[in-house]
Structure formats: structure tokens, C-alpha cells
Amino acid sequence: MASLHVRIIDFGVASWRENHLSDLIQSLALRAPEVTIGAPWDTGVDIWSLGCLVVEFVQGIVLFSGKASENGTWTAEDDHLARIAEVLGPFPSTLLEKGRRSAEFFDEQGKLIRVRNLKPTSLERLVNGDVKPFIKPADMLETEIGIFIDFIKSMLAIDPMARKSAAELLQHEWLS
């Protein structure tokens, strides 16, 4: 059997590292937090998107979708940021200080302005929970769960400076 080579490509909102064509790149569900808040961004945004896609492929869920409230209380971007905070925790103040749009979403204490009732959960629960769709995939060994979660967390660090590079990810135990 010939080996399979897969490439995932979406150049619809692509941009150069040195010459940003737009301030809002990536579809909302895959958008890195630094892009949403208007902080400087680099190739780490692609690592973020990859992390979101891997969870979607493994669990069949869109991890950080964003939907505006029906009554107009919050925007899709507000909801997107809230979902990130629910799963990954609060946004670092050092990142919020860099975002020119941070004040649109966060108060001085780093709490979301329009989405107040967060329902904290964890990546662990979303990958290895006890309620569908958050049940461990049938083909994932129990011993693999922690390694997989570590792999995902290394891509989905809210602080882009803490995110692993592609080269570092290739060395991760989950890929070996």
C-alpha cells in the first residue's frame, strides 16, 4: 500500500509574518487569542489553529467556537474568548497589556466584560470525560491520554510565548 500524505490548506486569510495583510486572520473557531485582542502575532497562530484542529479531529468538537448571544449581550468574539478562558484559564495580564483591543473585551482585572458566568472546565475533561462527546476516543489507549493532553496544551497556550514551535512539537512523545 502506498503511503498517505495529507496536507491541510486554507489560504483564504493567509498573511506574511513580516507584512500582515489583515488584523483578523484565521476563522473565528481557530483564531488565536492574540489575534482577537489585537496583540502582536507571529507563526504561533498557526500552532494554535493546529491544536484546535487536532482536538476537532480526535473528539469531533469545535473547541473554541464563538456565537453571539441572541439578545445581543455579547458578540461571537466575546464568546470565543470566554470558551478559551473556560478551558485554559484566565488570560495572562502580560498578553492583555499588549492587545490594542483588550479593553473591548476585558476589564482592568482581566475578566471578560460581557460574558460573566463562565463555566470552567478542563482540556482533560473534554478529552477524557464521562459524557458524550467528551468520552475518550475508543482507539486511544488509557496510557496515551496524558501524553495527548500535554501535546495539545503545548499548542494551546494562551500566551503565545509559551506555545511550542513546530520543530518542538515534532519531538513530542505523542507523535512518536
Image (tube, grey):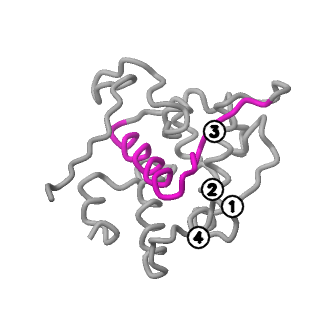
Q: Which residue is mark 1?
A: 121
Q: Which residue is mark 3?
A: 80
Q: Is residue 47 magenta?
A: yes
Which stretch is magenta?
A: 42-69
Q: Residues within 10 Å of mark 4 (few under 14, many from 20)?
A: many
Left or right, residue 108 beside residue 136:
right
**Quarter of the N terminus within the rendering:** bottom left
Kind of element beneath mark 3: helix
Q: What type is the residue that disc 4 sits on?
A: Asn
Kind of element beneath mark 2: helix
The label on residue 128 is 4
Label 1, label 3: how far apart the Cα atoms are: 15 Å
Q: What type is the residue that disc 2 sits on?
A: Val
Q: Residues within 10 Å of mark 2 (few under 14, many from 20)?
A: some
Residue at 59% across / 27% down in the picture? Answer: 101
Left or right, residue 146 beside residue 86:
left
Q: Residues within 10 Å of mark 3 (few under 14, many from 20)?
A: many
Taking depth in this image into account, of 114 and 151 the one nearest to the observer is: 151
